[in-house]
Amino acid sequence: MEYVNPEGLRLDGRRPLEMRQLRAELGVIPKADGCSAVFEMGNTKVIAAVYGPREVQNRSQQSNDQALIRCEYSMASFSVGDRMRKPKGDRRSTEISLVIRQTMEASILTHLMPRSQIDIFVQVLQADGGTRSACINAATLAIADAGIPMRDLVTSCAAGYLNGKPLLDLSYVEDSGGGPDVTLGLLPKLDEVTLLQMDSKLEIETFESVMQLAMEGCRAVANYIRQILLSNTKKLESRRGV
Ligand code: UDP
């Protein structure tokens, strides 16, 4: 299959190094007693809800030095149309929940909130590739909105390699093309990688260019997240009449 046509355009009309359109919104479940955010990367749309820091539900998991972070990733039944989707609790969801928890834990200042628990729920509303990245970005927004202290924003983006070209932010069709798919989690200010997943082998030179591309994607996400947080703060200030 031709993923990049002779004019240099991908199946959805993007250039190889172009990201999908980003869109985010904070406070999407205003009645809930936590903070929430929606994050879209093109047709991939996810929602994150964050609760806590609050009392640890299972006392045996309580730690006197740090907060307990829990994460649950799930896909809504309607999120993938008629494509394969296993019920909640499948291996893929368990793995992605773990990966997101570890990625967020690397930035949250857990030692400032001992004997407490923070729950991060992420649900895929529409899946078109890159759902774990979108969930990390949504979780970052919700955590920042909840005022939970972090070392830096956590941002994520994937990049792949098809038809001899590195491609940024793969869609489902591109993801299914059989090429490598590198998902990166980056703390943009500290320039620290907190997540690196790759689903097939890649030559080192190619890997480096794909990884650089994913890093650029993460930085673009970081700029966008900062804009959203800033405009949200301005909105709150104008409501309070500051
Ligand atoms: N997908 C699907 N059904 C499933 C699981 C995944 O249609 O049961 C699609 C969905 O679009 C997802 C893509 O396959 O985004 C790639 O899934 P992967 O496991 O690589 O994770 P992701 O790229 O979403 O982080």
Image (tube, helix red, strand yellow):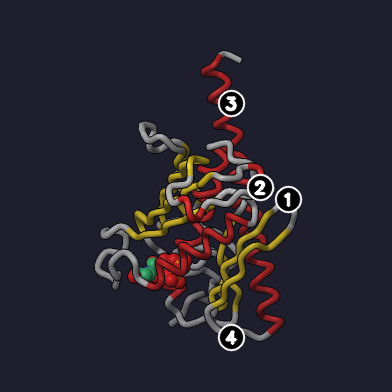
Q: Quadrant of residue 185?
A: bottom right
The image quadrant where one finds the N terminus is bottom left
Percent position of residue 241, x then y: 56, 13
Closer to the observer: label 4 or label 2? Answer: 2
Residue type at mark 4 is: Lys
Q: Are marks 3 and 1 in contact (CB under 8 Å)?
A: no
Q: Residue at x 66, y 70 (%)?
A: 211
Does the CB distance between marks 2 and 1 fall below 8 Å?
no
- Which of marks 1 and 3 precedes in the sequence? 1
Residue shown at 62% from the left, 84% from the top: 202
Are the residues tagged 1 and 4 within 8 Å (C-beta)?
A: no
Dot 2 crowding, Cα within 10 Å, few <14, some 14–19, many 20+: few
Foreground tag (3 vs 1): 1
Is 60 left, or right, of 222 in this rendering?
left
Q: Give the residue drawn at x 38%, y 61%.
A: 127
Q: Reading the chain from its start, which is encountered first: label 4 or label 2?
A: 2
